[in-house]
Image (cartoon, grey):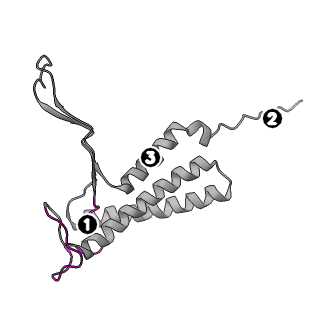
Amino acid sequence: MEFHGQYGKIFLSVFRLAAIVGLGWYLVRLVRNNAHWGLITSIALIFAGAIGNIVDSAFYGLLFSDSNYDTATFMPKVGGYATFLHGQVVDMFYMPFIRGSFPSWMPVVHNQSFTFFNFIFNCSDAYVTIGVILILAFQRKFYPRKTEQHNFQTI
């Protein structure tokens, strides 16, 4: 997600910090209440990913030169490319699984090239994604329904 301008970057950073505080509070609460270990692991993955992304955006711009189409330099003499909380999150993995082109018989996209799984991401993104997928996949196990108790009063 990208917000333009300095205020947008600050808003996003403050939102990330608030999310980290909320996730940390929820994680402590889950541990104290002996929640399912899978749910604790999933929330911990999301928490770790959020911390990784905020550390990147807070400090990367202070410590490195801009890395657009070049290798970044650590502690450049002129200083980093951004101020505190204005840095970019560094993505490092690109794994295109399949590259090819659409068959000529397909309408609209015929003979156009495509790449399957054309995403660029980092470890923090992977942790958040895995945590969310685990919660969605095992939500019935992590959040079991409480049996309904009826209180019938006799007259």
State the CA–CA distance, disc 1 to disc 2: 54 Å
Q: Amino acid at mark 3?
A: Ile
Say whether disc 1 or disc 3 marks the residue closer to the N-terminus: 1
Q: Which residue is mark 1?
A: 7
Q: Is 101 a magenta residue? A: no
Most distant residue in the right direction: 155
Q: In this view of the protein, which residue sits in the foreground, 85 or 97? A: 97
Q: How crowded is the residue under tag 1: few (<14 C-alpha within 10 Å), some, or many (20+)?
A: few
- Dot 3 surroundings within 10 Å: few (below 14), some, or many (20 or more)? some
Q: How far is mark 1 from mark 3, CA to CA?
A: 30 Å
Give the SS element for disc 2.
loop
User: Based on the displayed image, in which of its 4 quarters is residue 5 positioned?
Assistant: bottom left
> What secondary structure prevails in the magenta region?
loop
Q: Which residues are magenta?
A: 70-90
| Residue 82 covered by magenta stretch | yes
What's the distance in space between the residues labelled 2 and 3, CA to CA?
Answer: 41 Å
Kind of residue sitting beneath label 1: Tyr
Mark 2 is on which residue type?
A: Asn
Select label 1 or label 3 by which is in front: 3
Q: Quadrant of the C terminus?
A: top right
Of label 1 and label 2, which has the lower sequence position? 1
Task: Name the residue carrying label 2.
Answer: 151
Give me the disc on residue 130.
Answer: 3
Residue closer to the observer: 34 or 12: 34
Q: Quadrant of residue 151?
A: top right
Label 2 or label 3, whichever comes before in sequence order:
3
Q: Identify the image quadrant of residue 99.
A: top left
Q: Position of residue 26 (x, y in %)?
A: 56, 57
Label 3: element kind = helix
Label 1's element?
A: helix
User: Label 2 near label 1: C-beta < 8 Å?
Assistant: no
